[in-house]
Amino acid sequence: MNRVHFLNTAIDNLSMQETLQQIEDTIAEGRQMHHVVVNAGKIVAMQTDLQLRQSVNGSDLINADGQAVVWASRFLGKPLKERVAGIDLMIKLVAMAHSKGHRVYLLGAKEEVVKAVADEFSQQYSPGIIAGYRNGYFNKDEEKDIAKSIAESKAHILFVAISSPTKENFLYENREHLTGVNFIMGVGGSFDVVAGKVKRAPVWMQRVGLEWFFRFIQEPKRMWKRYLIGNSKFILLVLKERFKL
């Protein structure tokens, strides 16, 4: 009932607190929730990548990760309450897991990065919070066994730090093998931030929608196409939607 639709994308109109409450209820009741976030770049990709579109729109809970998506929703007359950044949600969920006695599994990034994240959470909370971890480098034919291994770890929450569309498709295609995990979520490059490999933008830049620019100036050679070209395409899509061009 809270879901809005634009640019071939479904997004749940929930605040951060409402999102956390739904997740907490899901875990408490022993159900499973498949979560995904969308930003401008992902929405652009979903216009032509039909598999990604299915994987995203087929999720149980979809949040707007990018501030640009929130602004676009308001411009298109379908206003979202607020941005629910994936990394902020992940950090809050780890804290919740600690307080509720839940365990998390970390999948993705390089071996030294995911290990650093596991160590950070273990030191900040307790070693018992980590159900297991694995780097994000594996072949397609290994996915089924990896998913089963995660389920066998008895984790309540799974965070997947792999680039799009691989993580979305992995979670969607292996959701049946992950049935025992209550909450599954893609977190993109969040492990790099927690491990201290990448700095996050100051809060004021996050609030005015310039987090992407902060990320861009850290790695311009790798990020220029994603942000400069991707953001331009997103603006064009929004204008076409608004004015029915």
Image: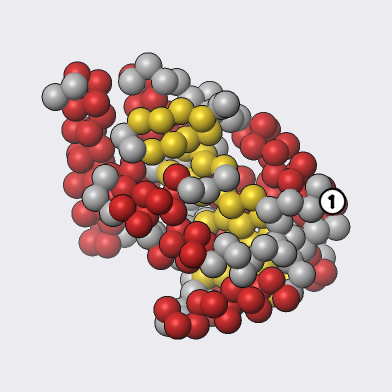
Q: On the picture, is 189 further left or further right than 92?
A: left
Residue at the far top: name it. Answer: 77
Q: Nearer the viewer, residue 53 or 66?
A: 53
Q: Position of residue 211 (x, y in %)?
A: 40, 42
Q: On the picture, is 78 further left or further right than 184?
A: left
Q: Position of residue 235 (x, y in %)?
A: 23, 33
Three-letter code, disc 1: Ser
Confirm whether residue 193 shows in the render: no
Residue at image location 60% in from the left, 65% down from the top: 176
Image quarter for residue 237?
top left
Residue at image location 20% in from the left, 39% down from the top: 232
Q: Nearer the viewer, residue 191 or 50?
A: 50
Q: Nearer the viewer, residue 148 or 156?
A: 148
- Which colour style is shown? secondary structure
Residue at the far left: name it. Answer: 245
Q: On the picture, is 114 further left or further right than 122?
A: left
Q: Nearer the viewer, residue 138 or 206?
A: 138
Q: Position of residue 117 (x, y in %)?
A: 62, 67
Looking at the rendered structure, the secondary structure element under dot 1 is: helix
Up the image or down, 38 lies above or below 104; here it is: above
Residue at image location 50% in from the left, 59% down from the top: 172
Q: Position of residue 219 (x, y in %)?
A: 31, 59
Marks counted in the figure total: 1
Residue at the far front: name it. Answer: 176
Q: Quadrant of the N terminus?
A: top right
Image quarter for residue 19?
top right
Q: Crowdedness of circle 1 by 10 Å Cα count: few (<14), some, many (20+)?
A: few
Q: Which residue is mark 1?
A: 99
Confirm whether residue 143 shows in the render: yes
